Amino acid sequence: MKRFCRGALGTTVALACAASAHAACGDSRDALIQEYVTYGVSLRPTCSNFTSSRRTEYFAFSELETGDYSWALLRSPFVAAKSTGYGIDRWRYEYGGPRYTNSVYRNPARNRRIGGATQSRHMYGDAADLDNRSGSTSEWWNMYYAAGRAHADWREPTNGPCGYACHHADWRSHSGGYSSTRPTEKAADSQGVAEALAVFDASGFDSPDWQARAAMLGRLLDAVGGTETLGFRAGRVGDLLASVESAAADGVKARLVSMLALENREVLIEKAPVSEDRSEYHAALTGVVANLRDARALPALGAALPTGFIAQRGVALLGVAAVPTLSQAFDSGLEPAQAGALHSLELLLAEQHEPMPAADRRAVRRIVLGGLAHPDFNIRLAAVGAAAHLAATDASVRDALVQLRDTDPYQNLDPEGISPAYPVRAAVAQRL
């Protein structure tokens, strides 16, 4: 028999709550799998999804399994080779020195004991909290920018659960499963979504209480997205909403954009304290809005650029229309926003196959040259990708890159000899 269980952020799923709901593994994985049911986690792992030995080039299995069992879920994008440009190994490489894990994979019972979010990405195996050993702001910010260069989808702010003690990054929206995965259930079609939205209860979207707003988002994920067996369904819900044209759908999209603007203001500007549950709500909301491909979302997504790849990709999806938003973010002088704008611009240029209007191209050139000349090496590094796209047709950008390749002063001494001694020079050389 099946019953319905509910967790946070839209996790009403049909759960086989009996112990016989999955094929028996014959070891402690049976109890571990049951925890996903008991604690209302929307993921449904199977025996073969777990590993008892997977490691990466730089992190041993004992550093990645931080739960109560000798088994862990570790998603492919998280443990990918650094050559892919993302994942925990790439994070360590970009940081330029040894890193130490605080929390990586957590089984649901342990996650509950330590106060983790109901749908914490640590239970999905694509998140890591790395220690800030010195406790300094400079170490924390260098980890933050390194995670950005490793294309982390979501990074928690300094007012998040870690504070300055550790830094959280995850790769929730990167594709890829475990060693073996079940197919994700078929998503709803546009007609079904339209019907669901016609009767959708959107109460709470403008509440001053973030938990009421999160509950509204949860209802939306339930109404539109169905269940998920693997990872991040918020982006899929955004895709579905983008495919529907109706007054009800337009109203829901507008409300979602307003909700993201409010959450950005409270969390990123006013620095309200952020629990892990609130961070998960912010990330899911960003994921939905990013995939709407709605120009009305540009200001809200622009404000969210510092959070990571989800928002950066969402801005880039809107193409040339996003250039003024990226200019505004860069001109703010706030370095996290500047780095986010440069990463987003790289994504935009990679997909820009038509000639840009002259005014937009001038704006893009100004942003890129400003990034390459920035006094902070983290911003110079963030600018290299976008600059490489312009270098073939813009002599001034190419000249600036060549100068950095030959003379950039920033030197890093990695005691393990993994990362380059001159990171900016090396990044440019790889691109030219």
Image (cartoon, helix red, strand yellow):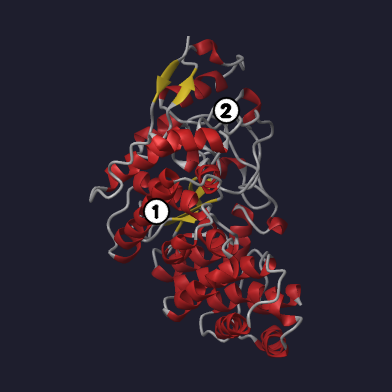
Disc 1 element: helix
Q: Is residue 306 left or right of residue 409?
A: left
Name the amino acid, label 2. Answer: Pro
Q: Disc number at residue 254? A: 1
Quadrant the C terminus occupies: bottom right
Name the residue located 71 percent from the left edge and 71 percent from the top edge: 354
Q: Can residue 334 be seen here?
A: yes
Circle 2 residue: 45
Mark 1 burial class by Cα count in 10 Å: few <14, some 14-19, many 20+: some
Name the residue located 51 percent from the left edge and 85 percent from the top edge: 375
Name the residue located 43 percent from the left edge and 32 percent from the top edge: 11
Q: Which is in the foreground here, disc 2 or disc 1?
A: 1
**Is 162 in front, or is 381?**
381
**Is 50 rendered above or below residue 381?**
above
Q: Can residue 9 be seen here?
A: no
Name the amino acid, label 1. Answer: Ala
**Is 26 in front, or is 150?**
150
**Is 210 rendered above or below residue 425?**
above
- Quarter-wise, where is residue 25 in the image? top right
